[in-house]
Image (cartoon, rainbow, N blue to C red):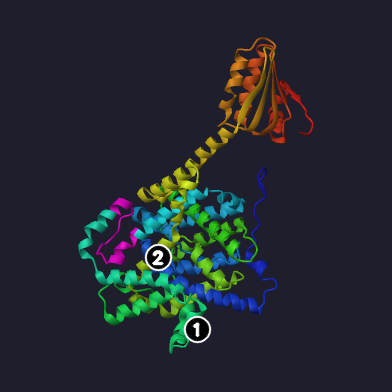
């Protein structure tokens, strides 16, 4: 379509491929998985929205609308999309600094950018973000999520939490006098229950046979397949309601959840404010792309479905993020926890994700009034557990096994994420990755002189001659600058992998110094890429090129 650009990515949702040969048996698997993951998504969607400074319905309708669009239009078979914990910190910061309307504008703009990334076939490039940077900001986000939930977990009376780390600590410390032991008890029981519930029936066969004989155990055992967040939400809400515990609930803070479809709304737009949203927009787009493609890679490893299409996935993520803000939603991406739940529940196609969205919609439309009784401390407990599972804490213990470059990138990204914000952390991490990569590659290049006389110098080039490595040619340049008339400098380029324009310029300077003294520069054994650059630049006409046989 555009001259000089690679062909644009075709729009081919994975759903169309998976529907070929679709059977009732597959639908039964997808339906069961979709209902399961839809129930799991209910408390998480509300918790993510509240933690982001939004109303709970923002998370619910994001999970429903974005979840449907990402499954129907995406490039994976089993990925589940919706609000994610990784967005909590950035969304909360945008809402506090710029307001809700500007969050919606940033999300729409990020959606357009995500679609363009996929359309221009840049999906595979997004996956090249170094794993040390990803682990660093993921662990930093987990710490910030945990810190942000201490207000509701401890029942502290804080009207509004600030966005930055040190201000949050100061605010929490100042409100410690309003500590509510009932709220802390609910939160801790929630965390403990989420940890123990999946392990409750993971016992050896002999003990299992013994407990099966106990009256009532079989009935209780039937509930062991119910997702732990649902058990925690229902049981602790009933407990708090029955005992009339003095804790904040969704109803006391937000007035409940509207029982009905969301209303289309056009966010207030101002060019003056939009100019300030460039960095938040880029952060949402980059974070959404990284999270969704990481999630897709996890899905590839855990399921037998075809490998994901990164470009189609980004286009679907873009459409979802461009649509949900008009219904009061928040940024969405692929979610690892719900995707893993979907896979383990037996999902085989995107139909499971569509059923997950329909299940959530049915629950919201039919049971929204009941949500007003849910204690905020319970949702805080859910997010504390999510934050703990989200972090790759073992990576800190393994740092000694890796290079200083890896340690620097991971630890600095982690620290900057906590102290400053995610935007600065991503920028720092990518800049560090670039600088350290250049430094490492420059060390790999060498220009070794292995023969030298007054009339002849022979040297061997090894590696990539690029802007970060041209200083390695300085010894050769000094020889050329002080050479006797008629010096021939022969460079063995059989192991020169690639050459950039800065490296070409260094060779040109070398050739000019030699020619001023009636000398010659000879290159032999050039590989395809360096030879192509020399020929296109016309430099090959000013030097001697020697062919060489197979090494």
Instruction: Give percent across and percent down for residue 505.
Output: 61, 25
Q: For the C terminus, which image quadrant?
A: top right
The quadrant in which residue 177 appears is bottom left
Q: CA distance from mark 2 to mark 1?
A: 31 Å
Foreground: disc 2 or disc 1 = 1
- Identify the residue shown where x is 50% and y is 56%: 288
Q: Is residue 353 left or right of residue 371?
A: right
Q: Residue furthest bottom?
A: 215
The residue where tag 1 is placed is 209
- Identify the residue shown where x is 65% and y is 10%: 484
Whether residue 155 appears in magenta in the rendering, the answer is: yes
The quadrant in which residue 539 appears is top right
Whether residue 67 appears in magenta in the rendering, the answer is: no
The residue where tag 2 is placed is 385
Q: Is residue 432 left or right of residue 297?
A: left
Helix, strand or loop status at disc 2: helix
């Amino acid at each position: 379509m555009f001259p000089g650009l690679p062909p644009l990515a075709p729009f081919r949702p994975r759903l169309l491929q998976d529907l070929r040969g679709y059977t009732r048996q597959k639908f039964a698997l997808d339906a069961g998985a979709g209902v399961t993951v839809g129930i799991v998504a209910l408390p998480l969607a509300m918790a993510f929205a509240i933690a982001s400074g939004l109303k709970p319905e923002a998370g619910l309708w994001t999970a429903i609308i974005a979840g449907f669009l990402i499954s129907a239009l995406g490039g994976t078979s089993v990925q589940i999309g919706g609000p994610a914990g990784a967005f909590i910190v950035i969304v909360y910061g945008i809402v506090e600094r710029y307001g809700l309307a500007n969050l919606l504008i940033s999300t729409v703009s990020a959606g357009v950018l995500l679609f363009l990334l996929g359309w221009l076939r840049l999906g595979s490039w997004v996956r090249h973000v170094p794993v040390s940077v990803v682990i660093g900001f993921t662990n930093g986000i987990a710490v910030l999520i945990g810190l942000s939930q201490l207000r509701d977990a401890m029942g502290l009376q804080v009207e509004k939490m600030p966005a930055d780390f040190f201000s949050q600590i100061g605010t929490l410390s100042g409100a410690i006098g309003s500590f509510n032991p009932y709220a802390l008890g609910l939160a801790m029981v929630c965390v403990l229950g989420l940890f123990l519930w999946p392990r409750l029936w993971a016992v050896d066969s002999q003990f299992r046979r013994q407990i099966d004989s106990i009256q009532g155990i079989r009935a209780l055992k039937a509930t062991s397949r119910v997702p732990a967040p649902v058990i925690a939400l229902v049981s602790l809400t009933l407990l708090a309601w029955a005992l009339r515990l003095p804790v904040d609930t969704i109803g006391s803070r937000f007035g409940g959840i509207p029982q009905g479809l969301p209303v289309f709304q056009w966010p207030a737009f101002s060019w003056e404010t939009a100019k300030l949203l460039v960095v938040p927009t880029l952060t949402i787009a980059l974070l959404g792309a990284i999270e969704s493609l990481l999630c897709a890679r996890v899905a590839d490893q855990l399921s037998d479905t075809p490998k994901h299409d990164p470009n189609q996935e980004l286009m679907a993520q873009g459409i979802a993020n461009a649509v949900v803000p008009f219904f009061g939603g928040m940024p969405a991406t692929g979610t690892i926890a719900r995707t893993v739940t979907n896979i383990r529940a037996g999902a085989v196609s995107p139909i499971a994700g569509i059923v997950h969205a329909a299940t959530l919609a049915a629950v919201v439309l039919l049971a929204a009034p009941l949500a007003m009784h849910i204690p905020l401390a319970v949702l805080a407990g859910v997010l504390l557990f999510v934050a703990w599972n989200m972090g790759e804490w073992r990576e800190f213990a393994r740092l000694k096994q890796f290079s200083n470059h890896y340690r620097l990138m991971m630890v600095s990204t982690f620290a900057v994420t906590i102290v400053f914000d995610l935007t600065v952390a991503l920028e720092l991490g990518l800049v560090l990755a670039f600088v350290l990569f250049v430094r490492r590659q420059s060390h790999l290049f060498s220009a070794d002189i292995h023969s030298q006389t007054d009339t002849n110098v022979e040297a061997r080039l090894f590696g990539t001659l690029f802007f970060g490595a041209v200083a390695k040619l300085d010894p050769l340049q000094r020889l050329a600058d002080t050479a006797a008339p008629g010096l021939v400098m022969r460079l063995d380029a059989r192991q020169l992998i690639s050459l950039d324009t800065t490296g070409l310029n260094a060779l040109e300077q070398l050739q000019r110094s030699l020619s001023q003294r009636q000398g010659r520069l000879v290159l032999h054994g050039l590989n395809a890429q360096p030879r192509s650059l020399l020929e296109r630049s016309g430099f090959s006409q000013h030097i001697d090129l020697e062919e060489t046989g197979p090494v």
